[in-house]
Image (tube, helix red, strand yellow):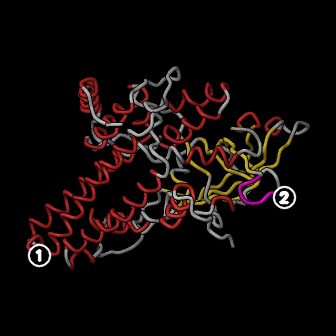
Amino acid sequence: MEFGFGSEDEVFRDEVRSWLAAHLDGEPARSAWERELGRGGWIGLGWGEDGYGNRRASLTQQVVWAEEYARAKAPPRSGHIGENLLAPTLIAHGTDEQKARFLPPVARGEELWCQGYSEPGAGSDLAGIRTTAVREKGGGPVDCADSYRVTGQKIWTSLAHEADWCFVLARTRPESTRHHGLTFLLVPMDQPGRIEIRPIRQLTGTSDFNEVFFDGAVARAEHMVGGEGNGWRVAMSLLGYERGVSTLAQQIGFAEELGRVVETAVANGAVTDPVVRDLLVRQWAELRTMRWNALRTLGSSGDGQGAAGAPSVSKLLWGRWHQRLGELAMRVRGAGAAVGPADWSPAAAYRLDAFQHLFLFSRADTIYGGSDEIQRTIIAERVLGLPKEPRG
């Protein structure tokens, strides 16, 4: 399928630009900005159906929105986990009651979500999770009647400190192993004494993700998605939505970062080094290649998820590319790039300049969201049909 933008897409682009220009004023609080997006009807464009407070948009229009949002340098989204991960999963696997309960608040920007997948001993190897959920059918307190009690620890939980809800993959059959006996549960985060959130400080000094401890947290049985014991199927379906249209918006940000590196190289004379020039051109060419690959794979299916293995290929490409850009930025800056604030402390890390932040943050690009090793295994086993990786 040839992917391109038509006249209707360009009309839509003008609408997007006009709305963003009229509503981007200063730096609004993240929660307030989500509600503003909800009032404008800009949440849930890719859900494939309306009626939940969202508007429908074609695949090309979803790309237009993502790219123009990035070009406008609009605030980082705190609602993207609910919009882009939970919502498509509920549309595919949830009951009508679950969709009616959870999709409208996401579309209005009123309820924020986080993802309870990774654990200290089960990161890339998600099937090794140990968090448990025990069913309680009546006879107890009101909040326990026909509910699950969730106990365990999740880690690297992005935006847990802001989230109202968490979708949790937990083991509901104690004797089960690996991907068997897992269940996908929707857990409210406002449970003092039952849920504890501890921020994790990153190399950059920021704390965007957290450890989350569940101590008998309650999840209603009616908020189980896909049936008990079917959590692995639901979880894998959700991961299929993790990369797609958002990759193109990400590339707009990458292009801006590369542009700043080029400008700095020209300004300080680093561009006169032929090796630096070669590296800059290589970064530009690889970024263009990633864009056309993303457009090609988006256009290869009607669901926005692209061809088999495409998400893993995309992750492998951009993760290492972004790391190389961070390394190149430090090289262009020269020795001064290695100097931090004079009053160095954890708090001072927040004053890192853009290139230092890029370099430090990008160290994790080949780990989070599925490590490079895991992506290669997915491609080998599920796309190329090679023998499965031996299990320890």
Name the residue rendered at 49%, 37% in the picture.
Answer: 83
The answer to whether residue 212 of the structure is visible from this angle is yes
Q: Which residue is mark 2?
A: 175
Provide residue 271's location: percent of width, then percent of height. 11, 70
Residue 243 is inside the magenta segment: no
Instruction: Please report the residue visible at 19 percent of the width from the left and 65 percent of the height from the top.
Output: 280
Secondary element under disc 1, as helix, strand or loop, is loop
Vertical relation: 285 (above or below) 340: above
Mark 1 residue type: Asp
Q: Residue 150: x and y, percent?
A: 75, 50
Q: Quadrant of residue 261?
A: bottom left
* Residue labelled with disc 1: 273
Q: Residue at x 65, y 41 (%)?
A: 188
Q: Quadrant of residue 350?
A: bottom left
In the figure, is residue 302 to the left or right of 72?
Answer: right
Extreme-bottom residue of the structure: 335
The residue closer to the viewer here, 301 or 235, is 301
Using the image, tell me which numbered label, if any, was put on residue 61: none
Against 183, residue 354 (above or below) is below
Residue 36 visible (yes or no): no
Please state if 161 lies on the left or on the right of 7 as rendered. Answer: right
Q: Nearer the viewer, residue 382 or 102?
A: 382
Where does the image place residue 242, in percent across and percent down from the top left? 49, 47
Kind of residue at disc 2: Glu
How far, Cα to Cα, is label 2 from label 1? 62 Å
Magenta highlight range: 176-180
Secondary structure, magenta segment, majority class? loop
Residue lying farthest right? 139
| Secondary-structure class at tag 2 | loop
Question: What is the quadrant of the N terminus in the image?
Answer: top left
Residue 273: where, in percent of width, then height? 11, 75
